[in-house]
Image: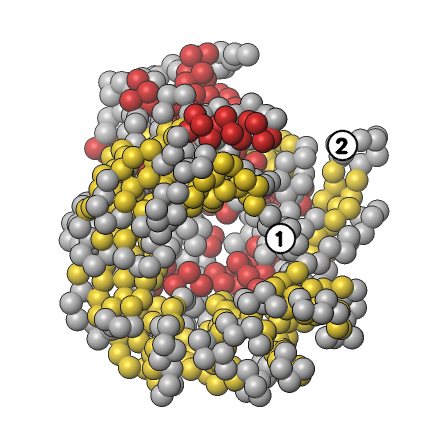
């Protein structure tokens, strides 16, 4: 039996934790800033980072500017110590002649003239979230006293556009579902305007948001910043099946006519918005798409701005759900065509719509692969570029590649042939892209490439994992096995302890998040380095991730397994996969299996203990949504449909009586995503059934509890005690 969980093991776990591992690896990706004829990016070194500049046509790379001189000038202007290897530079832009460099330091915008060696503050318009300026900057629209107002720059005169706005029934005001209010103080009126301008600055579309019927969720803050009395906070939340939703209705304002026109779409819950509203380039029409409640229908509308008339271009329908991640599109600049993604043939593919004739022209892509996103569209050459996975024979179907294809579906071309995941950034003109190419077992190589043919123009940088490898890090190992049906391939990864010995026996931990909107197994090197699985394995475990049937980014049939069936949690596939691995690898102890997860993954962890107690012996569950009736309306209505008996049947609360193994529940008391009542109610049911378990409520922590250092340490200790069977030697 393996006897890890020493102080040294904990130290390695800390070293490889999500918040610390970045100190051991550099240059995981290039995020470019695009200039007129070049790009700039950060290149990390032993002491910090420098900015490098690559010419787009020639591919030559150099330092972007004199870092020492700019540091001196910034220090003079700000009175602060500025190091050349940690310049506070954001939104960097270099002119075509390299004479002017503009950037901001998070507070102030600057211009550096490299010829005159002068650094100057740039006067910029203060950012006010309550204001929206027309594209030509001649008109300002703002919210005041729940209504819309307008002011022209030439006169400054303020004109009231609406008069009937009131509290919780106001105009163009964005209200984040993250917004938490203190009960004693109530909601602080701090409007954040949300309108969409036509390109000619003559019209804008806006909404009225009706929050009068929305009900609150509550949080008890036991450890406030000051005082001895606990504070009660609240936030608005639509729950599945409720009629008391926050509803939108849309209007168009015409500045020339001084008229407001109602859009002929009945008020609907705000969470049903899919794409738009966005303007056609003719400034006469608006595109918009929305779901129906239950998410089995989606309508794509074309709105006439002058009359408010709405024409339905098409309706997506599904017997299960129309997946929101697979419902996207891009209109051509000439307003003639729409490229739209749909799963109507069983896979996510692209379709061409004629916006003039208002009809489907043809299906662009087809086959057993998944189009993940549209990258660029060129109506002149009638070409669309897109990211997809699963097309290349013999490769992990989750790895994304860049392709191009003509509108008629001909000349489909692979532009990134390397057997790896390709995370790309496209230049504004659509001629170049940065390719961050990697796998979980291959550090990132970043290059500049041409969009037309994928040709590599310049090598930019390669991730430096030397210190990470010196620390004992082992590359996770991808694997493929068969799903519950014995036919379908499912994919996962194995994470090893830093001092792995194949002659030893290790407990295995299932790191679960069955989503079903996500993929749990990392696919690029950055996500392979930065996760909780590596640190947990260092304590003395084999940690596995598995994407079983019902999860995202595969065929429609594959995904449909989870519809109205989140209680499946992929367990038949997970158990089968772990048994398969154990059969091939003598170091896996199939009699000591644990599971952990966060959010929906925490639901997975608890549910696995309740429905498969013969297999899972211990579970650690962070911020779990243990009953879907208490969750976000959009998420549950998307994957569970409208509430019914199946909600109750799949609730962890209803199954609490089945607990046999070791269970640790954790929740932050300020979690406005998954309310802590989820965990507390589950605790109540476990107590009713006289079940032993551990529970930790962490003060002043929200849904990001998965990254909390203390919580992760408690997870390591929990599994060491209950799967390794030892009391870990702790450390300071």
Picture disc at residue 225: 2
Tell me if I can see residue 390 in this picture.
no
- Would you call the spot at circle 1 few (<14 residues within 10 Å), some (14-19), or many (20 or more)? few
Looking at marks 1 and 2 on the same chain, the residue that comes earlier in the sequence is marked by 1
Local SS, label 2: loop
Q: Tell me which residue sits at (24%, 21%) in the image.
A: 502
Q: Tell me which residue sits at (59%, 73%) in the image.
A: 204
* Pick the front one: 722 or 179: 179
Local SS, label 1: loop
Q: How far from the left and from the top, in percent, is residue 477?
A: 26, 34
Q: How far from the left and from the top, in percent, is residue 449?
A: 23, 49
Q: Is 304 placed above or below 716 here?
A: below
Residue 634 falls left or right of residue 50 = right
Residue indicated by mark 1: 125
Tell me if I can see residue 442 in this picture.
yes
Q: How far from the left and from the top, in percent, is residue 275?
A: 48, 68
Q: Tell me which residue sits at (59%, 65%) in the image.
A: 137
Q: Tell me which residue sits at (55%, 61%) in the image.
A: 634
* Residue 146 lies in quadrant: bottom right
* Residue 591 lies in quadrant: top left
Q: How far from the left and from the top, in percent, is residue 168?
A: 75, 65
Mark 1 → mark 2, Cα distance in angstroms: 34 Å
- Quadrant (top left, top right, bottom left, bottom right) of the C terminus: top right
Residue 180 falls left or right of residue 667 = right
Q: Is 184 placed above or below 713 here?
A: below
């Amino acid at each position: 039996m393996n006897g890890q969980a020493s102080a040294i093991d904990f130290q390695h776990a800390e070293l490889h934790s999500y918040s610390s591992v970045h100190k051991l690896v550099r240059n995981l990706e290039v995020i470019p800033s695009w200039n007129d004829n070049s790009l700039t990016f950060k290149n990390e070194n032993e002491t910090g980072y420098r900015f490098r500049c690559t010419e787009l046509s020639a591919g030559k790379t150099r330092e972007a500017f004199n870092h020492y001189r700019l540091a001196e000038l910034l220090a003079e202007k700000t009175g602060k110590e500025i190091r050349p290897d940690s310049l506070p530079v954001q939104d960097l832009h270099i002119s075509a002649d390299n004479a002017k460099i503009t950037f901001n330091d998070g507070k102030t915008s600057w211009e550096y003239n490299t010829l005159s060696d002068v650094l100057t503050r740039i006067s910029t318009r203060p950012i006010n979230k309550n204001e929206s300026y027309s594209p030509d900057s001649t008109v300002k629209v703002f919210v005041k006293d729940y209504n819309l107002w307008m002011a022209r720059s030439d006169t400054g005169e303020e004109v009231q556009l609406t008069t009937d706005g009131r509290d919780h029934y106001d105009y163009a005001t964005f209200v984040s579902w993250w917004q938490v209010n203190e009960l004693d103080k109530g909601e602080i009126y701090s409007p954040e305007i949300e309108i969409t301008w036509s390109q000619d600055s003559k019209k804008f579309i806006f909404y009225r948001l009706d929050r009068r019927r929305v009900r609150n969720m509550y949080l008890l803050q036991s450890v406030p910043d000051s005082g001895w009395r606990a504070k009660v906070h609240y936030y608005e939340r639509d729950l599945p099946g409720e009629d008391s939703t926050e509803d939108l209705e849309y209007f168009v304002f015409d500045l020339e006519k001084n008229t407001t026109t109602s859009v002929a779409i009945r008020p609907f819950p705000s969470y049903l918005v899919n794409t738009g509203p966005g303007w056609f380039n003719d400034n006469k029409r608006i595109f918009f798409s929305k779901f129906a409640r239950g998410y089995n229908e989606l309508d794509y509308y074309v709105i006439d701005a002058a009359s408010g008339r709405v024409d339905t271009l098409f309706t997506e329908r599904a017997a299960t759900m129309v997946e929101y991640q697979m419902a996207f599109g891009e209109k051509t600049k000439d307003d003639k065509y729409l490229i739209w993604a749909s799963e109507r043939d069983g896979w996510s593919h692209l379709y061409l719509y004629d916006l003039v004739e208002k009809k489907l022209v043809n299906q662009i892509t087809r086959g057993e692969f998944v189009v993940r996103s549209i990258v660029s569209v060129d109506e002149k050459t009638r070409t669309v570029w897109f990211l997809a996975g699963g097309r290349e024979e013999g490769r992990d179907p989750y790895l994304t590649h860049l392709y191009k294809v003509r509108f008629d579906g001909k000349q489909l071309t692979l532009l990134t042939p390397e057997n790896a995941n390709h995370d790309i950034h496209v230049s504004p003109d659509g001629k170049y892209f940065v390719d961050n190419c990697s796998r979980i077992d291959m550090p990132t190589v970043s290059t500049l490439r041409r969009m037309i043919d994928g040709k590599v123009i310049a090598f930019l940088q390669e991730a430096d994992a030397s210190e990470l490898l010196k620390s004992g890090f082992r590359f996770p190992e991808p694997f493929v096995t068969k799903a519950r049906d014995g036919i379908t391939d499912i994919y996962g990864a194995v994470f090893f302890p830093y001092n792995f010995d194949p002659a030893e026996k290790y407990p295995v931990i299932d790191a679960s998040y069955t989503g079903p909107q996500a993929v749990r197994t990392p696919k690029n090197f950055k996500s392979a380095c930065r996760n909780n699985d590596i640190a947990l394995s260092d304590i003395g475990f084999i940690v596995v991730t598995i994407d079983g049937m019902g999860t995202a980014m595969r065929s429609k049939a594959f995904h449909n397994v989870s519809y109205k069936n989140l209680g499946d949690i992929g367990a038949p596939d997970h158990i089968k996969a772990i048994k398969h691995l154990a059969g091939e690898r003598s170091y896996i102890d199939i009699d000591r299996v644990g599971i952990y997860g966060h959010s929906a993954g925490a639901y997975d962890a608890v549910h696995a203990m309740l429905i498969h107690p013969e297999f899972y012996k211990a579970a650690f569950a962070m911020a779990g949504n243990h009953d879907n009736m208490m969750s976000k309306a959009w998420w549950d209505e998307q994957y569970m449909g409208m509430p019914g008996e199946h909600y109750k049947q799949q609730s962890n609360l209803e199954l609490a009586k089945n607990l046999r193994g070791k269970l640790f529940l954790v929740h932050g008391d300020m979690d406005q995503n998954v309310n802590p009542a989820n965990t507390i109610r589950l605790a109540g049911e476990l107590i009713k059934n006289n079940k032993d378990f551990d529970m930790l409520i962490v003060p002043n922590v929200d849904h990001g509890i998965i990254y909390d250092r203390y919580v992760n340490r408690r997870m390591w200790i929990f599994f060491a005690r209950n799967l390794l069977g030892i009391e870990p030697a702790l450390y300071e």
